[in-house]
Amino acid sequence: MNDWLLVASMALVTFTIRYVLLAFSGRIQLSPTLVQALGYVPPVVLTAIVVPAVVLPDGETLLLGWQNARLVGAIACVILALWRKNLLLTIAGGMATFWGWQWLVS
Amino acid sequence: MAIASDFGIRSPRQEVLAGARDIIPLVVGAVPFGIVFGTLAQGSGLSFGATIGMSAFVFAGSSQFIALGLLAAGSTLPLIVLTTVVVNLRHMLYAASLLPYVQGSSGRWKAVIGFFLTDEAFAVAIRRYVQPDPSPHKHWYYLGAAVTMYGNWILCTWLGLTVGQLIPNAAAWGLDFAMVATFVGMIVPYATTRPMVGATLVAGIVAVLANGLPHKLGLMVAAIAGVTTGFWLETRLPPRPKAKG
């Protein structure tokens, strides 16, 4: 497959998805109900990306035990994020926990 | 202008710098992700130039990773493009959330905002847009955050393509866990109300249950289930004051 054709096609659909509503913003009136519902979009979508990446480490098998370093690392991230509202601390502490645990269980 | 500055409105330059500063933690989280992308790209059959091009023109990390996987598995172009649409559809939801703030903006601003619309830029910029001050320069804040993210993404892709090739088995180090850590750090601050907690819980569970659906459709199913749950809980539960920010 022509890889530049792939890049161009992916770029075109991605930009269209991001831009189309903005382009017609003058003609779109969102109902208050829809605006209220949209407030849930960011955390919900991010959660839907993250949870499978954590509990299905190989993409297929559910792994909910201590041997799953991703799960342990993610739990550490949640605790750190609740404890301090410091994103860098959450990322660094989560990575350290993940790597440490992976080293322990391997 | 004198009147505006009397009310403490920041200049476009100050907004750009503030946006760039505020997105730094998310940029740090994207560094390993970008490097791993660059490292894996050549092994899956994408040329050096097209890998940089993908980061520069598509600029959507999750879909770029999935495209690599499909490419390596010998998938066809229409199927990869279709999967890209599904994985990136969430950006349309972000655009919808931004609509109240771009009405009346120029076409050029709308195109710029659309091109750079990532999870990270949105998460940072929406907090600026919802602030009640009447600054006319909030788009500059978005631009500062988004361009910082963009420059870093291309740089890290390049690092993965060059330096990453020198590290043996770099992909097995679990660097992609940085994305999980970043996203968790972005999600948790939202979870201050019961409807929001309910919405994310349902989204997580449905995402796992629907994981087997083709073309990453499970993501959209989980998103719709989560948003519906949150909205339903909000209309049913008695309102209570928001938890301390």
Image (cartoon, coloured by chain):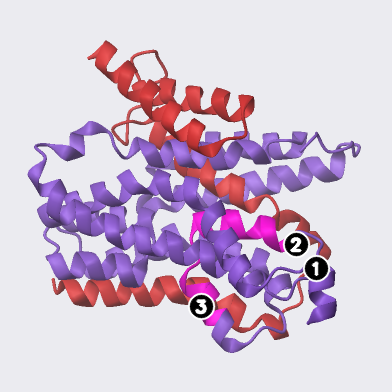
Residue located beneath label 3 in the image: B112
Instruction: Confirm whether residue B86 shows in the render.
Output: no
Report whether A22 appears left or right of A102.
right
Give the structural element (helix, strand or loop) at label 3. helix
Instruction: Give how far apart the Cα atoms at labels 3 and 1 are.
Output: 26 Å
Quarter of the figure that contains the N terminus of chain B = bottom right
Q: Compared with residue B177, is residue B35 higher up or lower down, i.e. above or below?
A: below
Residue extent of the magenta highlight: B110-130
Q: Which chain is red?
A: A
Question: Residue at (57%, 35%) from the top-left corner?
Answer: A86
Q: Percent from the top left, x then y, of residue B15?
A: 62, 66
Question: Residue at (89%, 36%) from the top-left corner?
Answer: B240
Tags 2 and 1 touching, CB below 8 Å: yes
Q: Percent from the top left, x then y, of residue A62?
A: 38, 26
Query: Residue A15, located in which quarter of the rendered image?
Result: bottom left
Q: Colour of chain B?
A: purple
Chain bearing tag 1 is: A
Q: Is residue A88 magenta?
A: no
Residue located beneath label 1 in the image: A31
Is disc 3 surrounded by few (<14), some (14 to 19) or many (20+) residues within 10 Å?
Answer: some
- Residue nearest the observer in this picture, B130 or A33: B130
Report whether A75 appears left or right of A85.
left
Task: Same chain for labels 3 and 1? Say yes or no.
Answer: no
**Which numbered marker is on residue A34?**
2
Query: Residue A24, located in which quarter of the rendered image?
Result: bottom right
Question: Residue at (23%, 66%) from the top-left corner?
Answer: B52
Give the structural element (helix, strand or loop) at label 1. loop
- Amino acid of disc 1: Ser
Task: Same chain for labels 2 and 1? Say yes or no.
Answer: yes
